[in-house]
Image: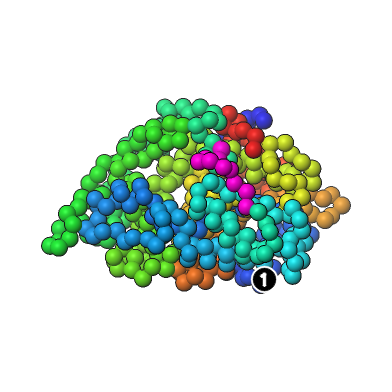
């Protein structure tokens, strides 16, 4: 694999909204390829709604005036409500793509035409199971995943490539003028809302004495995978609070943030979570180091779908047409960082990656005499209220522009050049 000169990233994209009704023909033509036929879909999805992780619950309690609510499932596990949402999305994906891929709507998909792979966590495996239940119930579709604690496809570090710690640090600090603490002042309104929700100022009788997150300095340390730089302190804590409140909201819990968080408040707080994620995971170095591997294998799978011939480096069977990778929000953010992607789903903040959201890479071929393959990229996300109400079968679906492509329809050869020029080959290994 060769590496080309790095192009300027174009990061702000105007979002055109396509509402994909479950019974509608959803893959609308954007640039005039009316004779296009869908050949393959590769989806990389965040898992469904989970409970708060043990580490988040432990480190956030000192900053809240009341105990954080407990969850009905173990820390970090997919909730029953989250599983319901993912089953609904499995049905949605079957309706959205099944007919165009040639699947009989009244029968199981052809043998080998579906390939489902999950990261090793309970929430990702359970998410993949729920997708299968919604897409092809009682069809015996297996969910593949690695045995053990890590999967190099999603977590290649340490082991695949070596992190340059100085470059990792600079990739974060260079985005904020070398100093992270002005971010709190720049986002003062969101931090003020955060402190109001947490109830730590002023201290009220009958509440737990607690500290203000806005007073905690934000720092970095090289304690991420393989030595990658990670955020610590104020912004990191604020992002975790916003994420925990989002999980409460989308899980349908009666009270969110002790009854002090509604949808609009949540949207304001999510600015802090998205900012933290983009700095820590979406910075160019971290994105390349941590997700070059999965992005290359997505490309190889699309190349396989275009040629109907096995491509070295990917384990996806050549006959597969619907490929679902059950992963995390970090992969969505990192792929955005590698390729310079941006999206805006109506009703959400720009570039959010909530539970059950997904990047879909759709491969088409024209049927004309000069048949060509091209890729369209979409971001798919149920609204917060759809998730909260357990009615997520009609999510929003918006097109995403890939910088370096001539438009939303990106010739596969062009898409291949873009990917291979942006990933780091030293962080790629056979799958």
Residue situated furthest left in the rendering? 205
Residue of label 1: 24
Q: Is residue 144 magenta?
A: yes
- Picture coordinates of residue 82 (x, y %)? 49, 62
Query: On the picture, is 134 further left or further right than 279?
Result: right
Q: Quadrant of residue 34?
A: bottom right
Name the residue rendered at 51%, 43% in the picture. 334
Considering the numbered disc 1 on the image, is that residue within a helix, a strand or a loop?
Answer: loop
| Residue range highlighted in magenta | 143-152
- Picture coordinates of residue 333 (x, y %)? 50, 47
Name the residue rendered at 43%, 28% in the picture. 165
Query: On the picture, is 141 further left or further right than 235?
Result: right
Q: Quadrant of residue 430?
A: top right
Q: Nearer the viewer, residue 341 or 383?
A: 383
Q: Nearer the viewer, residue 387 or 164?
A: 387
> What secondary structure is the magenta-colored segment mainly?
loop
Name the residue rendered at 70%, 62% in the picture. 139
Query: On the picture, is 44 further left or further right than 236?
Result: right
The scheme the figure's colours follow is rainbow
Q: Nearer the viewer, residue 88 or 166?
A: 88
Name the residue rendered at 77%, 50% in the picture. 319
- Picture coordinates of residue 289 (x, y %)? 52, 34
Above or below residue 22? Residue 296 is above
Q: Is residue 350 magenta?
A: no
- Picture coordinates of residue 349 (x, y %)? 44, 58
Can the viewer see residue 336 in this picture?
A: no
Q: Nearer the viewer, residue 169 or 98?
A: 98
């Amino acid at each position: 694999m060769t590496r080309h000169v790095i192009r300027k990233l174009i990061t702000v994209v105007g979002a055109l909204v396509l509402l994909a009704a479950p019974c509608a023909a959803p893959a609308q033509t954007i640039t005039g390829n009316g004779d296009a036929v869908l050949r393959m879909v590769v989806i990389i999805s965040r898992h469904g709604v989970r409970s708060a992780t043990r580490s988040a619950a432990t480190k956030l309690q000192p900053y809240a005036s009341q105990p954080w609510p407990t969850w009905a499932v173990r820390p970090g596990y997919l909730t029953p409500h989250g599983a319901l949402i993912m089953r609904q999305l499995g049905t949605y994906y079957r309706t959205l793509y099944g007919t165009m891929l040639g699947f009989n709507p009244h029968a199981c998909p052809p043998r080998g035409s579906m390939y489902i792979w999950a990261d090793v966590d309970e929430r990702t495996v359970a998410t993949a199971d729920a997708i299968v239940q919604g897409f092809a119930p009682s069809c015996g579709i297996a969910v593949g995943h690695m045995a053990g604690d890590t999967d190099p496809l999603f977590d290649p570090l340490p082991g695949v490539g070596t992190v340059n710690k100085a470059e990792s640090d600079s990739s974060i600090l260079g985005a904020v003028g070398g100093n992270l603490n002005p971010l709190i002042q720049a986002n003062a309104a969101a931090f003020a809302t955060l402190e109001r929700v947490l109830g730590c100022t002023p201290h009220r009788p009958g509440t737990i004495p607690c500290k203000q997150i806005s007073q905690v300095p934000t720092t970095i340390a090289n304690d991420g995978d393989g030595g990658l730089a990670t955020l610590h302190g104020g912004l990191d804590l604020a992002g975790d609070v916003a994420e925990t409140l989002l999980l409460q909201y989308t899980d349908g819990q009666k009270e969110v943030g002790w009854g002090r968080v509604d949808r609009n408040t949540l949207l304001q707080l999510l600015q802090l979570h998205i900012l933290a994620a983009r700095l820590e995971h979406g910075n160019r170095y971290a994105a390349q180091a941590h997700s070059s591997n999965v992005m290359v294998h997505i490309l190889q799978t699309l190349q396989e779908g275009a040629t109907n011939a096995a491509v070295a480096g990917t384990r996806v069977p050549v006959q597969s047409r619907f490929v679902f990778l059950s992963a995390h929000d970090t992969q969505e953010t990192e792929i955005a960082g590698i390729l310079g992607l941006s999206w805006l789903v109506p009703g959400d903040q720009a570039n959010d990656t909530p539970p059950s959201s997904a990047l879909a890479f759709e491969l088409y071929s024209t049927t004309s005499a000069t048949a060509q393959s091209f890729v369209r990229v979409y971001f798919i996300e149920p609204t917060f209220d759809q998730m909260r109400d357990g009615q997520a079968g009609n999510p929003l679906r918006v097109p995403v522009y890939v910088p370096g492509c001539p438009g939303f329809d990106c010739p596969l050869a062009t898409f291949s050049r873009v990917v291979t020029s942006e990933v780091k080959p030293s962080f790629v290994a056979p799958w």
